[in-house]
Amino acid sequence: MKLYFAPETCSLSPHIVLRELGLPFELVKVDNKTKRTADGQNFLAVNPKGYVAALQLENGEVLTEGPAIVQYLADLRPEAKLAPANGSWQRVRLQESLNFITSEIHAGLSPLFNATLPDGVKTVFKDKLRRRLDQVASTLEQHDYLLGAQFGVADAYLFTVLRWTALFSIDLAEWPAIARYMENIGSRATVKSALAAETAA
Ligand SMILES: N[C@@H](CCC(=O)N[C@@H](CS)C(=O)NCC(=O)O)C(=O)O
């Protein structure tokens, strides 16, 4: 499998999951500005949507959309228990959680990267995000990981997008349960090695 990624972006989430599962994979770096890959391809030919993450399978198919990619990967090695079994109620809870992260946190942070957006508009997005973080904190006050006592794919995704808050002066120390969570996930060997590999690439 090939994971098309760009450093410090949401592709870190499937990258962490690949390492957690111990699956063989190749990293292909994408320049998000030029849409060229480090191995000389036109990234738009790989993923016409033009964004990472994209996972190319051995049969040539390309899977996009972070929440779909991490669930596909987790199901390749169910014994690792990074996602509850397909068809179970807990799996529905995972999908609820991934959808919350993608539409409320990931998409909530995205406008803050837009340098042309007036500060007043950014404040509106930040205020909404803070309310979402209150919700995340109340979940993490009850258990160490999003879905309970065990690390899973939703944690790889949440950790990835919450790292961006530092860029926008949102101090996660305001939510002690989230700050603890970030430290905990950040201390995982797979997370450290994924970050190091992306920096070195
Ligand atoms: N809906 C997609 C969004 C992916 C996305 O936002 N990717 C960003 C990096 S975090 C990107 O590559 N943006 C470049 C672009 O849109 O040109 C997903 O959830 O995977």
Image (spheres, rainbow, N blue to C red):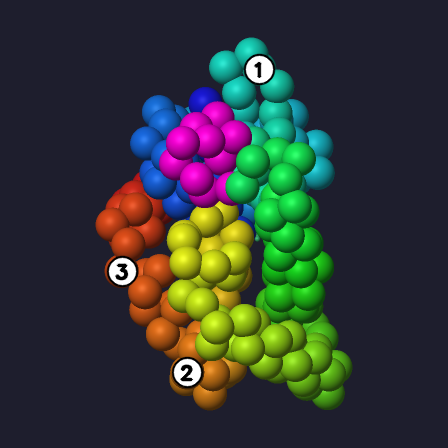
Question: What SS does tag 3 mark?
Answer: loop
Q: Position of residue 3 (x, y in %)?
A: 47, 32
Q: Main secondary structure of the magenta part?
A: helix
Residue range in magenta is 73-83
Which badge, 3 or 2, is on the more N-terminal residue? 2
Q: Where is residue 24 in the image (x, y as percent from the top left)?
A: 35, 25
Q: Name the residue under label 1.
A: 60
Pick whichever of labels 1 and 3 is earlier in the sequence.
1
Q: Closer to the observer: label 1 or label 2?
A: 2
Name the secondary structure under disc 2.
helix
Separation (CA) of disc 1 from disc 3: 34 Å
Q: How crowded is mark 1: few (under 14 residues within 10 Å), some or many (20 or more)?
A: few
CA–CA distance between discs 3 and 2?
Answer: 17 Å
Q: Mark 2 sits on what residue? A: 176
Of the 4 image quadrants, the one containing the C terminus is top left
Amino acid type, callout 3: Ser
Query: Can residue 148 be seen by looking at this rendering?
Result: yes
Determine the residue positioned at 41% across, 53% down: 150
Q: Is mark 3 within 8 Å of ligand 1?
A: no
Query: Mark 3 = which residue?
Result: 187
* Image coords of residue 76 (percent x, y): 48, 26
Identity of the residue drawn at 56% across and 36% down: 85
Residue in view at x 30 percent, y 46 percent: 190
Residue 79 inside the magenta-drawn segment: yes
The residue type indicated by label 2 comes to Pro
Q: Which of marks 1 and 2 is nearer the N terminus?
A: 1
Q: Quadrant of residue 117?
A: bottom right
* Left or right: where 108 falls relative to 151: right
Crowd rating for badge 2 (residues with CA inside 10 Å; few <14, some 14–19, many 20+)? few
Amino acid type at circle 1 is Gly
